[in-house]
Amino acid sequence: MRPGLVIMATAFGIVGAPLALGGVVVVVAVAATVAGATGAAQTSACPARDLPPGGVARTIDAWIRRQVPDSPLAGIGAQMVAGAAGSGLDPRLLAAIAMQETRLGTAGGGPAVFNPFGLGPGLAFPNWAAAIRLAVGTLATMHSGGAWSISGIAVHWAPVGASNDPGGLNVNWVGGVGASYAQLGGDPTGPVFFARNVARNGVRVGSCPSVVAPRAS
């Protein structure tokens, strides 16, 4: 990763109750800077059998349909899996971020510009697959800088106390994304990457994403 790389993201904070209970979506622009390499060392990849691609796509699609039946993202679980392939990213995180940022593509400017992840500000894409590619690349860059969990990603994607978050909405990001990721069967406090688990000073700080039965929502 190049030193001083700047990644821009627009976070849609969810205020109050969960979305199913009528949470309010508010737009907040967040500028995230990932500075330089951190000296993280890659360890071995998790076994591919941990997340069978077909099963993950079906899990994502079923969860989207349960959460937001009118979501335009319904049926693109396979695109999320394909987009994450080779990056080490657990594709379930993409769905969890899309829920937090744009209520699965139904809030803010997401539907009109194919931007369910709040990338930008002001970015428009020709289709959902293009947005998925940039989101995966952005997350992979953050991971190269040492972010391996939802809370670690939030430091760059939606930092608490950012000058362009006057309402303090970014404080909701970790909890909101984590809750959705848990519903998808992941561990919201564990690693969300498979292939780039990092170790510092010989101490391993990431392993493999949790794979359990998705929770009923």
Image: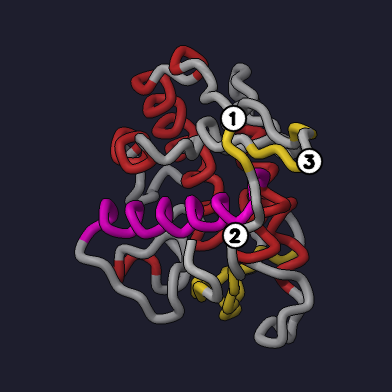
| Quadrant occupied by the C terminus | top right
Locate residue 181: give its quadrant.
Answer: top right
How far apart marks 1 and 3 lie (CA) works out to 13 Å
Q: Residue 54 is drawn in which quadrant? A: top left
Helix, strand or loop at disc 2? loop
Q: Judging from the image, what secondary structure is the residue with disc 1 in?
A: loop
Magenta extent: 127-149
Q: Which residue is mark 3?
A: 201
Verify whether residue 76 appears in magenta.
Answer: no
Q: Is residue 128 magenta?
A: yes
Which is more N-terminal, label 2 or label 1? Answer: 2
Q: Amino acid at mark 2?
A: Ala
User: Which mark, residue 37?
Assistant: 2
In the image, which disc is placed on residue 43?
A: 1
Residue drawn 59% across the image and 60% down it:
37
User: How many residues crowd around disc 3 within 10 Å: few (fewer than 14), some, or many (20 or more)?
Assistant: few
CA–CA distance in space, label 1 to label 2: 16 Å
| Amino acid, disc 1 | Thr
